[in-house]
Amino acid sequence: MKPLPIDRMMRAARCALGGLTLAMLAPAAVGAAEPAPFELPRPALDILVMRGDQSLPIAQVPSLSEGDRLSIEADLPDDQGARFILVSAFLRGATNPPPKDWVRFAETWKKKDKDKALVLTVPKGARQMVLFLVPDTGGAEGVLSDAVRGKPGEFVRATQDLNQASLDRSRLDAFMAAIKAQENSHPEYLRSVAPTLARSLAMKLNEECLSKVVEMQAACLLDNRDALVLSDVHSSSIAETLTGAPTDLALQLAATREAGYGFYSPYIGVVRDIAKIFGAFSSPQFDYLPTLSVRKPEGMSLLLNAAPSFQKPKSVMVVAMPSIEADSPPRLRRSGDAPICVARAGTVLPVEGAPLIFSTPYAREVKLALKTASGETVDLPLEARADRGGYVLTGDDAPPAFKGTVQGHLFGRWGFDRFEGPDFMVQMPDAGGWTVEGDSAALVVGRDNGLVLKGGAPACVESVMLRQGEGAPKPMEWKVQGRDALALTVPLTDRKPGALSIEVKYQGVAQPSAIALRSYAQASRLDGLLLHAGDKTALLSGQRLDQVESVDVNGLLMRPDGLTRDGAVDRLRLVGQSDAVALEAGSAATARVKLRDERSVSLALTVADARPQIGLLSKDVSLGAPPANGKVLALNGDNLLPDNGQLVFSVRAGEGTKLSASDAIEVAPVEDGATIRLTAANGLRLESPYVMVATLDPKAMAPSLFGPLRFRLLRGGEASDWQPLVTLARLPQIAAVSCAAKADGCTITGRDLFLIDAVGATPTLDQAAQVAHGYTGSALKAPAPQDGKLYLRLRDAPDSVVTLPAA
């Protein structure tokens, strides 16, 4: 995609980023003045929102709803000299002026509550709300009412920008407060805490600060704070993602002379944009002064970037209220799939994707619900901690019934509504002890040994120690493997054969669990070489096969390609490096095994029968049912299998191979990943001893199975060579395609749009629009189609192009 000229990029950035604009600060030589920051506190507003039989302070309400009842009162000092009129206005869109009765007034200096406060009900059809504090002036009510009703679109834009900037300011304040807290208490932790804070709050982190001396790190991190705030993916817009990740676009422009070497600052952008909007309303009587809202327990405190004027033109303070729309709960994701031990308070449940949970009180009463296999449940309270990268367990430990592995579900309140978070696999120590997986006699002195222990809660292991005889225990390396295993590295390089024990200690448990084992001395030994007729790969079995350099069989030179252990036996896979005369099945041969110490050992073998072989005969892809209300993607050829479709393919036995009902076909990704085995019980049918028909249903496969797939025949312990089969592509759900003027292109709406890599107007995808990785929006901008169709390249099938009707 060709880069846009800088002027077009700047216009695109302003349109795409909306309230979170890309501001350019020109240096003094260019002559651009830096707008003042929002640092002047006061006044404040006490606002209570009532919905049904519930009531919440405005700080805990992410969005308003039709029918909400509001109580709004200005929190002014008792010695307030200037009188202010409190004005509220509901808006119903940029092109629809509100009725007169949607603009209300209250005189804040009155003694009676009913006169100095606004008691409102959000009317049906309202979409935005704005508040004003205006010095008492004759005719102020009429001027404000005419301004709001005369150009509602300007106030709609202003409320959106100011509200978003206030949310961004909350993230900045949370970041600064956490950095200062560490600076005052544990400055040495800043190097580890700062990156976690930046990820949690979506902040721009200057990595160079962390290389400075401890005393200078905090000041460096907080320098240029207006440049710290990056886009919040929870509220990112469609246009942001189409143009490119907002962060990337901001950083590209920031380094250019044309962009004034600017900073990515929402506050500066808001100041300039709002100044332009409100400039149209300036009069000898009033000027408009934007404010940022800082959420407090009882309401909101206002921050100004200029001192209000009480002389003409007097300052009208503009306060943005939350939008009037359905709540959008945070799209929380867990960070990683490993089990988490919840044996102690303070355990972190890592989450990402919603910075506002750390910087606002929108998310409240957040808990982790646990449920045992017997049905017993308990809710553990959580606290959001940006410096820890997620939610932290508070309060008491889980009840004694919760042992081993338990499924946990994060949930809470988002404003008035319940929101559902991710699931976690959590563990608590149990009394089941540990067992060795496989043969414990595989421990051999003279080298490090791998060992797997099975137990109930590996995530809760605090330490693993190795003890031999009466000697002192020594710590061992370990890592959690799956939900019930510990993978250990047993260091026996300098040990003697004999009894030893491994001691595994749980968190919060006084006594460790000991596993008695024995290590053995072992010499190099070659047991046998398995080589099939016609193959260039072989399998060598024995002990101490890590010493094997190469194997030569009648001119076929093979080298190691992976060592595994099967109990007490090493198995070394060998891959041919040269061509040689094919050996016939049943013929005798001699293998020359060269060791790393330059010794050679002869090993007699008998060439085994050829492995079973099959070839792809035909295949047919059937598409799934078209969506009831959506667009159908057209796929080209039979090499692309949609995740809602089905593949029927047939295979023919190779020479010397006969098929049977006990055979299986294994399907797997070309890269490492989950596999699926097709048998007579799940989609495999035998047409004859030479032809077999298989049915592959993506809906029955693991979610991690996608992209190019391959297949092979399994028979007993033997397998044929891998062969390409089909490309499994997960399809986005396209709801609609709407196209405006050709210059403006089209908008694609739907779900799972992150599965699209690029969208273009031609089959060759010239000048296609790229979709950012990890895109979570529900709409995409696309170029205008040239033949009534758009063309998509999917992430799972980068070599194929699918067609999307644009009409």
Image (spheres, grey):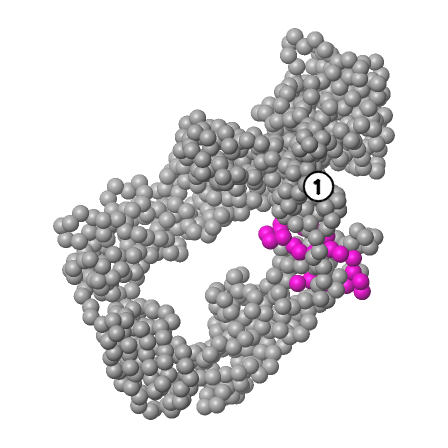
Could you tell me which quadrant the N terminus lies in?
A: bottom right
- Residue kind at label 1, given as amino acid type: Glu
Q: Residue at x 85, y 25 (%)?
A: 146
- The question of residue 289 being in magenta is answered with no
Position of residue 640 in the picture relative to residue 96 (left or right): left
Residue holding disc 1: 258
The image shows residue 2 at horizontal and vertical percentages of: 71, 56
Neighbourhood count class around disc 1 (C-alpha, 10 Å): few under 14, some 14–19, many 20 upward: some
Residue 204 lies in what quarter of the image? top right
298 above or below 538?
above
Q: Give the residue displayed 84% in from the left and 21% down from the top.
A: 283
Q: Is residue 539 above or below residue 767?
A: below
Percent x, y of residue 714? 44, 78
Query: Left or right: 538 with respect to 101?
Result: left
Image check: 673 left or right of 320?
left
Q: Is residue 393 above or below residue 79?
A: below
Quadrant of the rendered image containing residue 562? bottom left
Q: Nearer the viewer, residue 561 or 435?
A: 561
| Residue 378 spot, x, y in % from top left | 44, 41
Q: Is residue 779 magenta?
A: yes
> Looking at the image, is 315 positioned above or below residue 478?
above
Q: Residue at x 71, y 26 (%)?
A: 290
- Where residue 235 appears, x then y in whole percent? 64, 42
Of residues 208 and 318, which is closer to you in this image?
208
Q: Provide the secondary structure element on which disc 1 rests.
A: loop
The quarter of the rendered structure image containing the C terminus is bottom right
The residue located at (69%, 66%) in the rendering is: 802
Question: Which residue range is magenta in the image?
Answer: 769-793
